[in-house]
Amino acid sequence: MPRHMSYIPHGVIPAVLLPFDSEFAIDEANFRKHLRDVAAVEGLSAITINAHSTEVGSCTVDEQRRVVEIAQDEIGAKLPLINGIWADGSIEAARLAKMATQGGASALLVFPPAPFTLGQSPAMALAHFKRIADATDLPLIVFQYPLATGQGYPKDTLLKLCEEVPSIRAIKDWIGNVPHHEWHVRTLQSLPRPVNVLTTHSAWLFSSLVLGCNGLLSGSGSVIADLQAQMFRAVQRNDMAEAKRLNDRIEPTARVFYADPFVDMHNRMKEALVLLGRMERAVVRPPLIKLGEAELTSLRQAIADARLGAEGALDIAA
């Protein structure tokens, strides 16, 4: 059973990557090392698995189960695990919720079903979340997509979800609109049963955190969890000078990680870890493909500009 049953999603939560070998199988040894590396960072509140960053859309259910097993074995005694629920159907989502609960997860990150790109109603969204909530007693995190995708939940729908599904305790906020993002922060965190806003606006993290988010959940944490944790603490204590200094270090990485095409963000993070000597190889599953030399040059420069790793350890002309 989960070790962290009372966990409420908050604070700094990296979403880790999933290494693959040259045959596209999960590289378990390097995954364990990556988990240990990230979990060793001071100031984290949890680790996220089976999400965008682990290329969950390309993973079978058995592979997702194995990811939970490895993470629980490697770092489950140290940090709560948040498991992504990626499914196009509500019945399958409920099955994944049961699997993750049995595997020791402490919270679930619920991705929006792909069919919602064709349209959704408040009743559909509510039925989806209620089916998942009925399958587990773990706290749920609503992944809030931009409304233009069709998968984001309009304000009234989101409020209805928070009111009628008591186990919803946070949202992962990717709304992509600053006034709407601020509405989330002001409204959801002030509900009678507060719902924390975990920003995933990693391309403008400093600006987002200043609005008052109670946490952040980001794939960038697979590379710069230390800088994210330091900046979150600086903003919390209202030390804006220190937060701006940290943002100046984070910005070069954000600029290259979240460049077009956006789908390559975690591909770039894997390559960054290889350049830093923290990951053996950067293999991604198709339809993603290996980055070209121009992108690797940009990554080398960003790593140097952000002063990641040991000083002078990286030859950016390599």
Image (cartoon, rainbow, N blue to C red):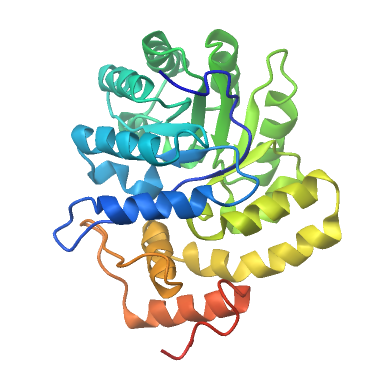
Quadrant location of residue 268?
A: bottom left
Q: x, y (%) of residue 280?
A: 32, 67
| Residue closest to the eye, 118 or 21 | 21
Quadrant location of residue 217?
A: top right
Picture layout, residue 317 above or below residue 145: below
| Residue closest to the eye, 314 or 245 | 314
Q: x, y (%) of residue 157?
A: 54, 20
Query: In the displayed structure, does residue 206 sit left or right of residue 259?
Result: right
User: Which residue lies at the image location 40% right of the left edge and 25% below the top edge?
Assistant: 104
Total number of numbered labels? 0
Picture layout, residue 306 above or below residue 147: below
Query: In the displayed structure, does residue 198 sit left or right of residue 83?
Result: right
> Image quadrant for the N terminus?
top left
User: Which residue lies at the image location 52% right of the left edge and 18% below the top edge?
Assistant: 5
Quadrant location of residue 241?
A: bottom right
> Image quadrant for the C terminus?
bottom left
User: Which residue lies at the image location 62% right of the left edge and 45% below the top edge?
Assistant: 177
User: Which residue lies at the image location 75% right of the left edge and 48% below the top edge?
Assistant: 233
Q: x, y (%) of residue 20?
A: 24, 56
Q: Is residue 204 at all visible to an observer of this figure?
A: no
Query: In the displayed structure, does residue 181 sit left or right of residue 95?
Result: right
Q: Is residue 102 at all visible to an observer of this figure?
A: yes
Query: In the displayed structure, does residue 66 sit left or right of residue 219?
Result: left
Q: x, y (%) of residue 4?
A: 52, 23
Query: Residue lying furthest left in this view?
Result: 23
